[in-house]
Image (cartoon, rainbow, N blue to C red):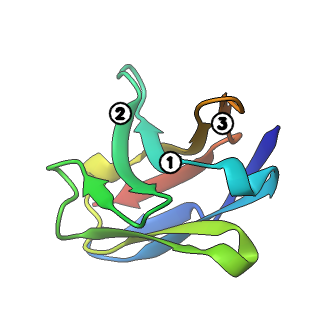
Amino acid sequence: QVQLVESGGGLVQAGGSLRLSCAASGIVSRISTTGWYRQAPGKQRELVAGITSGGSTNYADSVNGRFTISRDNARATVYLQMNSLKPEDTAVYYCNARGYGVTKFDSWGQGTQVTVSS
């Protein structure tokens, strides 16, 4: 019902910045929440940042003040601006979109690798 494609990952030195993009297609008008998650090797997937259809945002404590989630409704795209990157931010980053009610879905992108070197 909703397809997601992430882009923007790569290799960056500690202290650097990257911007991830998550382009949605399908019934994008039914998306209630969009989130960025990450999964490092040997660790569980964790929520990094989320944004609701109303524009409310939330962040993991570990990234608060460094990462910013935003969206461009005209392009059906959600962004994750990552500044002051640390080696512990290294992970595969996934985009997630959820819809509730009559049109319920839980969609994931394929993931994009972010590697921060020290």
Answer few, some or many: residues within 10 Å of disc 2's Cα (few below 14, many 20 plus, some between 14 and 19): some
Mark 2 or 3, nearer chain start: 2
Q: Are marks 2 and 3 in contact (CB under 8 Å)?
A: no
**Amino acid, disc 2:** Glu
Q: Is residue 107 above or below residue 21?
A: above
Q: Residue at x 66, y 68 (%)?
A: 77
Which residue is identified by label 2?
Answer: 46
Left or right of 89: which side holds 1? right
Comes first in the chain, label 1 or label 2 = 1
Tell me the kind of residue under disc 1.
Thr
State the quadrant of the N terminus: top right
Q: Quadrant of residue 45?
A: top left
Instruction: Tell me the residue at 42%/57% (across/down).
Output: 51
Seen in the picture, residue 57 relative to 16 is either above or below; the reply is above
Badge 3 marks a residue whose secondary structure is strand
Task: Write down the quadrant of residue 104 in the picture.
Answer: top right
In 3D space, how far apart are the residues under numbered discs 1 and 2 (Cα atoms)? 16 Å
Label of residue 33 in the image: 1
Q: CA distance from mark 2 to mark 3?
A: 14 Å
* Image location (x, y in percent) of residue 99: 61, 38
Q: Which residue is mark 3?
A: 108
Three-letter code, disc 3: Trp
Q: Nearer the viewer, mark 1 or mark 2?
A: 1
Q: Residue at x 39, y 76 (%)?
A: 17
Which residue is pictured at 67% across the width and 35% down the height?
A: 107
Q: Are marks 1 and 2 in contact (CB under 8 Å)?
A: no
Element class at badge 1 = strand
Q: Which residue is more in the foreground, 18 or 101? A: 101
Label number found at residue 9: none
Quarter of the rendering occupied by the C terminus: bottom left
Q: Which of the two discs, 1 and 3, sits closer to the camera?
A: 1
- The secondary structure type at the circle numbered 2 is strand
